[in-house]
Image: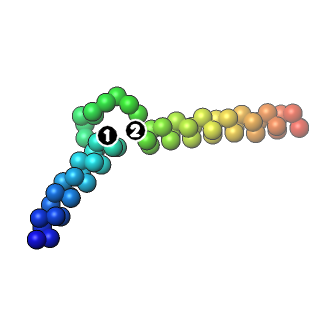
Amino acid sequence: MPKLLSIPYSIGLGLGIIVFFNHFSKITLTQDPTPIEIEMTTYEKETNASVIDHLNRRKGGA
C-alpha cells in the first residue's frame, strides 16, 4: 500500500521540480531566465553600484 502512494508522489515531485526550475536538462521549456539567473543579475547590479559608490566617496573625501 505505501508504494501505491509513494511512486506517483515521487514522479509528481520530480516533474514539478523540472517544470518550476526549468533548467535540469539541455532542453528548456521556455526562454525565461531561471530564478538563480535573476538573482545573479540582481547581485551583479548591486555589487557594481556599491563599488561605484565606494569609489566616488573615496575620490570626494581624499
In depth, the one of 28 and 11 nearer the eye is 11
Residue at image x 83%, y 34%?
59
Residues at marks 1 and 2, CA–CA distance in whole angstroms = 7 Å
- In the rendered image, the quadrant that contains the N terminus is bottom left
Number of numbered markers: 2
Say what secondary structure mark 1 lies in: loop
Q: Which residue is labeled 2 in the image?
A: 34
- In the rendered image, the quadrant that contains the C terminus is top right
Residue at image x 41%, y 33%?
33
Residue at image x 75%, y 36%?
53
Decide: few, some or many residues near mark 1? Use Cα within 10 Å; few <14, some 14-19, many ≥20.
some
Which quarter of the figure has residue 42?
A: top right
Residue 3 in picture, x, y percent from top left = 12, 67
Q: Which residue is labeled 1 in the image?
A: 22
Say what secondary structure mark 2 lies in: loop
In the image, what residue type sits under mark 1?
Answer: Asn
